[in-house]
Image: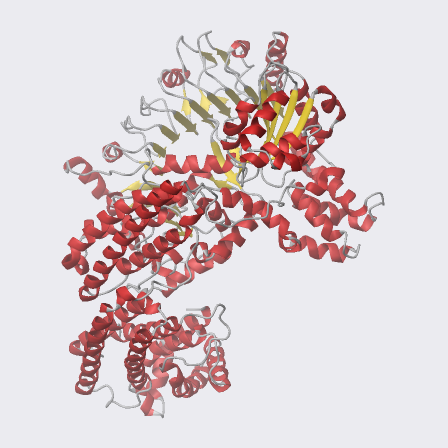
């Protein structure tokens, strides 16, 4: 309910009002005390309807809610009661199915949805009635009402099923019969709602009325059974669905069926054989679908859409609340449809092989070839001066053998513009005997590219070339290039096929020839020389914008600040700058006018020209099917949001976007998907991990807007919401759920109970809200993040949960059932958590106790040695963040690969031999304990933070830290005040060290010079450390440079300089 209805319900259940009703001179209204519970439901239903009945009803409704909100004294209660009497009589109109058009809804809802909304309203009323205090409704009536509620629940599921959405006469007839019965139930409930005496509530009369309705439902079910016979002859579901095709729809269905089989729900036991057969047939269909998704033939689009429709239909049927008599024929029909789809795919596969159908982009959303990057920037080249000089040198110097030089970056960055500048540079033109340019694009045609290259070279007529055969063109090109020093620019390369086709025609006579590629994908395998184009700086963006808007004129002083602000909001992308410049150049040169543009920059960029969206959509359309949902999902985050990669991967896995047929874990596959999107220039790396991996990522503003627009266009996830609007929607879904009735749903539109992901962690909360109910009905949840204000027992039914995150601020207990959740992989308690006593007992006494799937826990508060027993029951646990809150004998399980420990002491536990990453926080250790760490055979990352050492001398022993790649000392001290330690590594220590980080580190005199001789060392970073440490870092760099090592980088950062710069900028 909305807040006004919540207040209304609270007021109506208030004891003062109850006493007032009992003392009222109008004794007719004191009989039906349940009205206090039914009125808020009716009010909420009226508010949900998007059309008005008569103005009088709405005015009275507003007046009543207003009175409820300000109900503070006896007089106010009396006025509220008078309004209640008027309202009950006036709400009669909402107890029948609405017949007026829903003018405020766009698009107009299907007629079935209007009926479903009304039936849901009736179900809510029945639920409220059965929850009345004991004795108000006698048991026999209670049972009849529950039976009536069940029948109405089936109608909700039936009305959403695919066949009933077909616009044919037989469907209209059955829908008409449903409306008649449902309206009669509505009239009956209104008689209870407005009861003024005991006669309506008399047990015998109620029993007869309810029994009569149940008989009518039996007759209605007979008609529905007859109707089901015609189902195979009717078209499939006509509801709007996502046009994003991926494996996840099939995998999600297989998950649902597997759960049904494993948990043997009562409602499906009689049809278990059909469910198992459906699972087996879908598994076979999934392997067949590889042909559609991998081959990507345009001719298969219709078949792909039909397959998608079938998957949605199956999902709806198996997840809806329907009786066995309905499931039996529907499952048979679905099995037959799967068989027909498999036959159609096989037929298409055979015919396409025989006919030699060429592979083309799929689905067929063609963009005009002229959607090229920044052609109009050619005369206004700004930025990339360093890159131009560097690439020019790569083209004109270096080895004599043929080399491939690549310019890569995200769409709109100016790759083609830079390539043109290089191609037309006189020094480059004079260096080569032949210079030729061709555009490859998504729609690569070998003959067209050959013609482009020959026509671009000297003395070749394009029209003459068009008449030649492809083989003759290739031969002519080879002869022309033989023995020459040539430069061939291949612009807009999307994959390796063009080069594989053409490389044989580019002779390598060791004359210094070069092939220059531009591409959005840096992982095409052309690894000779790869140049990743950076974004423009804010200053370069402003220079470009100022030139495009004012040319040689001076920018008015009043526009300088707002102009630079707009330039900065372009986030370094020339495409954004060029597009917004054309808008600014054609409006008034006033600060107020420019301010309006700045407030809605992306909307203006996209709406001003179709070329911008076309350029960006090209990358989306070229994505393979499995990456499209992953890319569009970035729209679910806020603009400019920095996204933790582990969270993103957990979300992708939870949503079902990851192809489960691949070898390796879902998380590993998801990571490969992310790297593919990064390499294609669609996702940006925000921060790297200590081991060189990606820690956080983000997406450019324009690509974020592109995600939102494409998602709306293709109806991806029913439209994407993000930020606070998504949080509010999730909370509203919880409030709509009532624990006594499981709602049917459409999981692929992510409506209500079909949610697989819910984030209520408080990131977007404006106030603390307690999650006290509703979650237990979201049985399809895979990912749940909540604030500390949640009752953990609510999640016990969520047996599909894979990720649970709780933003608690105090220690909480982990219920045993959480560890028993078979699919749970990641468990995160921000404020710390402890195992329950029952978990300790089971781990020590029950040999069958296993926590099979759990991979990570954070943050575990270890109180005693029993925790080791529990952790030992988790064979797949790889990552643990913990705090040693008591000193006790303890041993970490050996399968751990990543360990983060707070409050470590010398007497603390030993370390697992399989550790690859170790972080110690707030420790107090001797160097001897560090030597134990050094002997760990697989350790690659070591971080020592906010702790102290006891001795002044750190002498490493031979053979320590043999695999260590990253070492960080952060805010580490010596126990004795003002002391500094001597770090004396041997020549054999740290043979694979790549990165050394010292931050706020005053415990060392200097960095040992011997570290500079480590062949793998790439970077030394010093942040806010003692001057002697900074000096030693500089000396190491200088010594290495004298020895010819230019690869070692030394970064020195002074906190005081950073702080003063921040103050000056403020």
Q: Determine whether, in the image, residue 404 is placed left or right of residue 675.
A: right
Position above or below: 1057 against 116: above
Nearer-the-camera pick, 934 or 447 = 447
Q: Say whether residue 653 is visible.
A: no
Residue at 26% across, 43% down: 819
Nearer-the-camera pick, 828 or 287 = 287
Q: Determine whether, in the image, residue 39 is placed left or right of residue 60.
A: left
Nearer-the-camera pick, 116 or 74 = 116
Position above or below: 511 against 66: above
From the image, which quarter does the C terminus lie in? top right
**Residue 220 % position (x, y):** 23, 77
Quarter residue 536 falls in:
top right
**Residue 433 % position (x, y):** 70, 20
**Residue 384 % position (x, y):** 69, 31
From the image, which quarter does the N terminus lie in? bottom left
Total numbered circles: 0
Q: Determine whether, in the image, residue 271 is placed left or right of residue 680.
A: left
Residue at 63% across, 45% down: 370
Q: Say whether residue 388 is visible.
A: yes
Nearer-the-camera pick, 58 or 978 = 58
Quarter residue 641 falls in:
top right
């Amino acid at each position: 309910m909305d807040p006004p209805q919540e207040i209304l319900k609270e007021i109506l259940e208030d004891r003062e009002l109850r006493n007032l009703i009992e003392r009222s001179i109008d004794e007719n209204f004191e009989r039906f005390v349940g009205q206090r519970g039914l009125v808020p439901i009716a009010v909420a239903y009226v508010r949900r309807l998007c059309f008005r009945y008569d103005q009088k009803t709405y005015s009275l409704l507003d007046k009543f809610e207003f009175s409820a909100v300000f109900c503070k004294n006896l007089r106010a209660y009396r006025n509220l009661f008078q309004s209640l009497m008027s309202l009950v009589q006036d709400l009669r109109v909402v107890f029948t199915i609405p017949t007026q058009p829903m003018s405020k809804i766009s698009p107009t809802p299907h007629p079935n949805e209007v009926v479903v909304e009304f039936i849901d309203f009736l179900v809510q009323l029945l639920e409220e009635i059965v929850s009345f205090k004991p004795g108000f409704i006698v048991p026999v009536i209670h049972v009849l009402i529950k039976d009536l509620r069940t029948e109405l629940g089936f109608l909700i599921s039936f009305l959403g099923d695919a066949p009933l959405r077909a616009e044919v006469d037989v469907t209209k007839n059955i829908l008409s019969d449903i409306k008649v019965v449902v309206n009669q139930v509505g009239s009956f409930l209104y008689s209870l709602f407005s009861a003024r005496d005991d006669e309506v509530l008399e047990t015998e009369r109620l029993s007869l009325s309810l029994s009569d309705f149940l008989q009518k439902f039996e007759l209605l079910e007979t008609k529905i059974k007859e109707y089901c016979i015609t189902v195979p002859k009717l078209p499939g579901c006509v509801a709007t669905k996502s046009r994003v095709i991926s494996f996840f729809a099939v995998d999600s269905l297989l998950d649902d069926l597997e759960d049904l089989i494993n948990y043997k729900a009562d409602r499906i036991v009689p049809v278990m054989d059909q469910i198992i057969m459906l699972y087996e047939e879908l598994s076979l269909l999934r392997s067949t679908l590889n042909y559609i998704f991998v081959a990507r033939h345009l001719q298969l689009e219709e078949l792909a859409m039909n397959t998608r429709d079938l998957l949605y239909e199956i999902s709806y049927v198996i997840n809806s609340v329907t009786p066995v008599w309905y499931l039996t024929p529907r499952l048979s029909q679905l099995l037959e449809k799967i068989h027909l789809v498999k036959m159609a795919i096989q037929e298409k596969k055979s015919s396409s092989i025989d006919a030699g159908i060429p592979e083309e982009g799929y689905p067929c959303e063609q963009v005009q070839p002229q959607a090229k990057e920044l052609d109009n920037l050619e005369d206004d080249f700004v930025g990339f001066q360093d890159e131009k000089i560097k690439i020019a040198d790569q083209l004109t110097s270096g080895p004599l053998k043929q080399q491939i030089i690549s310019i890569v970056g995200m769409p709109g960055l100016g790759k083609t513009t830079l390539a043109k500048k290089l191609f037309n540079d006189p020094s480059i033109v004079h260096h080569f005997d032949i210079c030729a340019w061709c555009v490859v694009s998504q729609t690569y045609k070998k003959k067209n590219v050959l013609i482009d290259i020959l026509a671009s070279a000297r003395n070749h007529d394009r029209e003459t070339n068009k008449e030649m055969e492809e083989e003759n063109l290739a031969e002519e090109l080879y002869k022309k290039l033989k023995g020459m020093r040539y430069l061939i620019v291949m612009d807009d390369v999307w994959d390796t096929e063009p080069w594989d086709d053409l490389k044989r025609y580019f002779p390598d006579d060791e004359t210094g020839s070069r092939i220059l590629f531009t591409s959005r994908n840096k992982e095409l395998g052309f690894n000779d020389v790869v140049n990743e184009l950076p974004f423009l700086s804010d200053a370069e963006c402003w220079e470009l914008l100022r030139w495009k808007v004012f040319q040689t004129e001076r920018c008015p002083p009043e526009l300088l600040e707002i102009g630079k602000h707009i330039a900065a909001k372009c986030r370094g992308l020339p495409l954004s700058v060029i597009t917004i410049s054309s808008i600014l150049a054609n409006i008034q040169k006033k600060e107020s006018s420019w301010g309006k543009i700045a407030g809605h920059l992306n909307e203006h960029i996209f709406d001003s020209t179709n070329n911008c969206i076309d350029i960006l959509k090209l990358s989306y359309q070229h994505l393979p099917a499995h990456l499209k949902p992953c890319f569009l999902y970035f729209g679910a985050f806020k603009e400019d949001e920095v996204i933790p990669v582990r969270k993103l991967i957990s979300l992708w896995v939870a949503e079902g976007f990851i192809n489960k047929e691949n070898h390796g874990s879902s998380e590993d596959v998801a990571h490969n998907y992310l790297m593919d999107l990064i390499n294609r220039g669609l996702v940006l790396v925000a921060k790297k991990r200590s081991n060189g991996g990606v820690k956080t990522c983000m997406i450019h503003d324009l690509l974020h807007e592109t995600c939102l627009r494409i998602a709306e266009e293709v109806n991806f996830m029913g439209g994407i919401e993000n930020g606070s609007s998504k949080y509010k929607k999730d909370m509203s879904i919880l409030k709509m759920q009532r624990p006594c009735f499981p709602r049917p749903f459409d999981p692929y539109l992510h409506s209500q109970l079909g949610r697989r992901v819910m984030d209520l962690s408080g990131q977007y909360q404006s106030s603390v809200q307690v999650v006290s109910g509703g979650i237990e009905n979201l049985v399809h949840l895979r990912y749940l993040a909540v604030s500390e204000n949640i009752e953990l027992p609510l999640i016990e039914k969520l047996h599909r949960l894979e990720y649970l995150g709780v933003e608690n601020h105090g220690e909480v207990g982990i219920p045993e059932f959480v560890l028993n959740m078979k699919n749970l992989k990641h468990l995160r308690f921000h404020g710390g958590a402890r195992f329950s006593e029952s978990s300790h007992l089971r781990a020590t006494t029950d040999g069958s106790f296993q926590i099979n799937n759990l991979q990570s826990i954070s943050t575990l508060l270890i109180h005693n040695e029993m925790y080791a027993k529990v952790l030992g029951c988790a064979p797949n646990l790889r990552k643990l963040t913990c705090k040693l809150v008591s000193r006790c004998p303890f041993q970490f399980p050996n399968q751990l690969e990543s360990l983060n420990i707070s409050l470590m002491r010398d007497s603390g536990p030993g370390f697992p031999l399989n550790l690859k990453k170790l972080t110690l926080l707030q420790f107090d250790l001797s160097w001897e304990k560090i030597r134990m760490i050094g002997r760990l055979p697989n350790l690659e990352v070591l971080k020592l933070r906010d702790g102290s050492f006891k001795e002044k001398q750190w002498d490493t022993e031979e053979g320590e830290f043999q695999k260590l790649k990253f070492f960080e000392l952060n805010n580490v001290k010596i126990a004795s005040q003002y002391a500094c330690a001597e770090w004396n590594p041997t020549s054999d220590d740290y043979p694979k060290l790549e990165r050394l980080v010292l931050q706020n580190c005053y415990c060392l005199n200097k960095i040992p010079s011997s570290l500079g001789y480590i062949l793998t060392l790439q970077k030394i970073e010093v942040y806010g450390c003692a001057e002697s440490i900074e000096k030693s870092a500089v000396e190491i760099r200088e010594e290495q440079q004298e020895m010819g090592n230019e690869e070692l980088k030394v970064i020195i950062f002074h906190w005081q300089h950073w702080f003063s710069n921040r103050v000056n900028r403020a």
